[in-house]
Image (cartoon, rainbow, N blue to C red):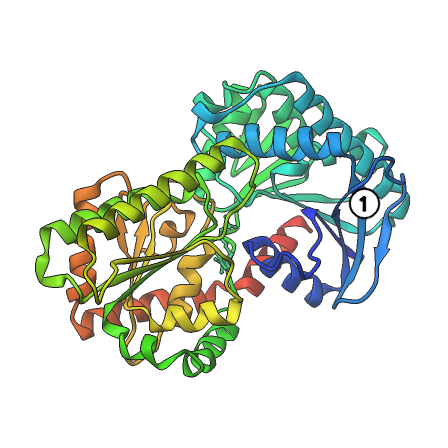
Amino acid sequence: MGRLICLSNRIPTGANPSGGLVVAVGDALEQAGGIWIGTSGEVCETPSDELREIEGGPFRRLCFDLTEEEQQNYYAGYANSVLWPLLHGRTDLVDIHQEYLATYKKVNRRLARMLAPHLEPDDRIWVHDFHLLALAHELRVLGVGNRIGFFLHTPFPEPLSMHVLPNGREVCQWLSGFDLIGLQAERDVRACLASMVEIGEAIDLGSGYLHLGQRQCRVAAFPIAIDAREFMDLAEEQFQALPAGIVKDRRRLMIGVDRLDYSKGVPQRFRAFGEFLSRHEEWHRHVSLLQISPPTREGVQAYDAIREETEHLSGRINGTFADIQWAPIRFINRAVPREVLAGLYRAAHVGLVTPLMDGMNLVAKEFIAAQNPEDPGVLILSQFAGAAEQMTAALIVNPHDTEQMASTILTALAMSHSERRERYEALLEVLLTQDVHWWSKNFLDALG
Ligand code: ADP
């Protein structure tokens, strides 16, 4: 069997440990042996046209630098200001500029040219996420015939949203350069097939197969996962290390953990908690929400806005309800080490995972894996997280419906021990059978 070559926008450097991709793909590479290729995170005026080896780590890593212009137009521009909002149903935030697209293509082409000389005929190539949609297409132009798989970590948009892209048809052609297009959920498979047919004029051959131009590709769902066993052990161990005050407070803690991204629904969550508090005075001083949200993609305008909105809302809710001994919301704008998070999840009675739109959402899976099996907490999960297709035993909510979310918070806080255990056991079963090893094996088997 040939090597596995993984590509993503960033290679893991130790400086960026958060993000679902790093956890899941690092695992697959360690298992299969291979190389991870991506940008270094450094900006340089005249980047080399060769990939650079990074020493150390559990697998080989090769990287390249971006120019300042590429960082602005490819990364902050086309990837984060066009594709990300489009993929998350925020077409109102899509910011179209010619130079964004031109630079996006240039970076994908440059990477294809740097990669091609490293390839051996039986290497399998696995491309990750929306930064590299054009990579297979560029490799095919160079005559690369290897199997190339793609995994999109975000949702796939419906055709109506895809029409927002002036180059939607071209994007579909790029995608047809892959042999396998892996998506998070069945809803994404349906949307992708519909978009490829309507916008790309692909022919639907049935069973997820598409024909476009000279190529045939397959679209299928591979819900990404975590190493549930490892996380269970980590949480059990780390729970012991938490400060006594947090452990003693167990019954009263609700937790939210998300990058401060507009897709995560943090303002809606705060409003629902505010609504809950205004309806239920008996819960005042008996419950608090710990929201851990490190800033992300700073400098992109929509992210500055979400930061202001959430700071304003948490301030208002605390101002309205707090007394000298209690603040309902603790809002932390910092990344927290993974092991501390694991302990905190276990200390929490309720996990609030309420994105407006999310490819999968690994926090939902981490929260469940971290629970004490004898006395588990309750997961409140948005119907718009890809995870909702698998995690049906969670309390499923519509994050736009403030009143429903407020009453679900009460249901979660008041849930009987037997119902908590029943739901937890059903959820854990999914996590243990469909874990990260299952995910990468399934994808790579399908890639062939
Ligand atoms: P996304 O990839 O969009 O950020 P996911 O929920 O799929 O969303 O993955 C998020 C990952 O990042 C999880 O592994 C989670 O533990 C980690 N993470 C999220 N917020 C924080 C934080 N405040 N500190 C540390 N890690 C975080």
**Relative to 135, does residue 364 appear above or below in the rendering?**
below
* Residue 222 shown left or right of residue 267 in the figure: right
Give the residue displayed 55% in from the left and 26% down from the top: 196
Q: Taking 30 as reference, is 301 above or below it?
A: above
Is label 1 in a helix, a strand or a loop? strand
- Write the residue at 71% across / 58% down: 13
State whether residue 437 is above or below residue 162: below
Q: Foreground residue, 189 or 14?
A: 14
- Which quadrant of the figure contains the N terminus? bottom right
Q: Give neighbour class at mark 1: few <14, some 14-19, many 20+ (Cα, 10 Å).
A: many
Query: What is the three-letter code of the residue carrying label 1?
Result: Phe
Residue 10: percent from the left, percent from the top?
A: 69, 48
Residue 192 can be seen, yes or no:
no
Tag 1 residue:
64
Point 56% across, 27% down: residue: 82
* 323 or 292: nearer the viewer: 323
Q: Position of residue 375 (x, y in %)?
A: 27, 78
**Residue 147 place in picture, x, y as percent:** 74, 44
* Residue 183 visible, this angle: yes
Q: Residue furthest front?
A: 324
Q: At which x and y percent is residue 436?
A: 55, 62
